[in-house]
Amino acid sequence: MKIENILIVSPMYQELRAYIQNAGVQKNIRYIPEDEATQENLKWADALVSFNLKSDYDYSHLKWVHSLGAGVDRFLYKKTWDDRVLLTRTVCTFGQRIGEYCLSYILRDLQCHEEFRELQLQKKWQQRTPKLLNELKVMVYGTGEIGQAVAKLLSGFGVEVYGVSQSGKEKEYFKEAMTVESHFIILGEMDLIINTMPLTEETAGFFNSQVFQKVTNAGFINVGRGASVDEESLLQALEDGQVRYAVLDVFTQEPLPENHPLWIHPGVLITPHISAVTTPGEGAACFLDTLRNLEENKPLNNRVDTNKGY
């Protein structure tokens, strides 16, 4: 595939320009912030590099669209995609970042950080024995690149990790992999649920009352997509004690509205979609690598199956 005109739309467009220009790419490249993107800009381009465009556009005349994020729901979810347009995504340290994000909150809970901080404020010397990682059973939803990285990290500490995917195909680092139809069988045994799934028609609203009713006193971490969670059902599960605590990095609406009850719920910890950020260096490197492979007709390990949505 021959690419000549590339439009890069991103809040970090200046940083990306520095990396790409330093690489000496011989292409016509325009760099603009998201607020300035228009359909006219896209008409000029053969290829688009972006992540979270603020409007819906027609991409059908493009040869290639590259997502600066791991997810591509901004391009595919509830949209029709022209199969003639190649769609790729960024692959970098997302799995490691998300794995370490999850581990930090798991240890926070097991090591009783909140309880000991409260006792410190009360000047009370009251011992409590922390739990060990190898005592945990964790269910990871999504067994792709990111889910596997999470499973690898946790299983390395002796955590018993189970995986859930559409196919239920066995994957390394998971004690057992199940389908979305069969995972209910052992869901009640889990100490923690971690969502890493992409947003598709099948995963939208997946974590609802039917799922939460199957767990007891479990933790819930969402590093997948906010729209995969029915937030009303999650709040109810927190009130009923089915979910003991929730760590939420993604939401149906971002930024999370100021009046949303999740902000002030004592069992909820909120971060502003930072569990797997794309750094300018990593974003540029993956884009350049994909461009090189594309023009040399080499395999693309980051090509998106637009029918599946990931």
Image (cartoon, rainbow, N blue to C red):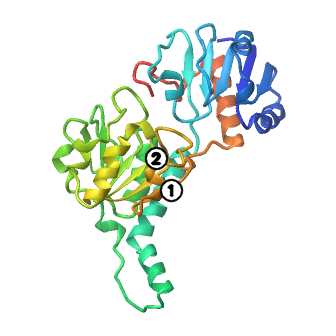
Structural crowding at the residue carrying mark 2, measured as other residues with C-alpha within 10 Å and reported as few (<14), some (14–19) or many (≥20) = many
Tell which of 214 and 173 is nearer to you. Answer: 214
Amino acid carrying label 1: it is Tyr
Residue at screen point 70% across, 32% down: 10
In the picture provided, is 229 more to the left or to the right than 90?
A: left
Identify the residue position indicated by label 2 in the image: 223
Above or below for 110 versus 76: below
Answer yes or no: is residue 8 visible: yes
| Count of number-bearing discs | 2
Answer yes or no: is residue 143 visible: no
Q: Residue reaching furthest front?
A: 259
Amino acid carrying label 2: it is Val
Identify the residue position indicated by label 1 in the image: 101
Residue at screen point 49% across, 14% down: 81
Cα–Cα gap, marks 2 and 1:
9 Å
Q: Pick the quarter of the image with the N terminus.
A: top right
Structural crowding at the residue carrying mark 1, measured as other residues with C-alpha within 10 Å and reported as few (<14), some (14–19) or many (≥20) = some
Above or below for 157 versus 16: below
Task: Name the image quarter holding residue 20.
Answer: top right
Disc nearer the start of the sequence (2/1): 1
Tell which of 240 and 249 is nearer to you. Answer: 240
Residue at screen point 49% across, 11% down: 83
Residue at screen point 54% across, 51% down: 97
| SS for callout 1 | helix
Q: Are marks 2 and 1 in contact (CB under 8 Å)?
A: yes
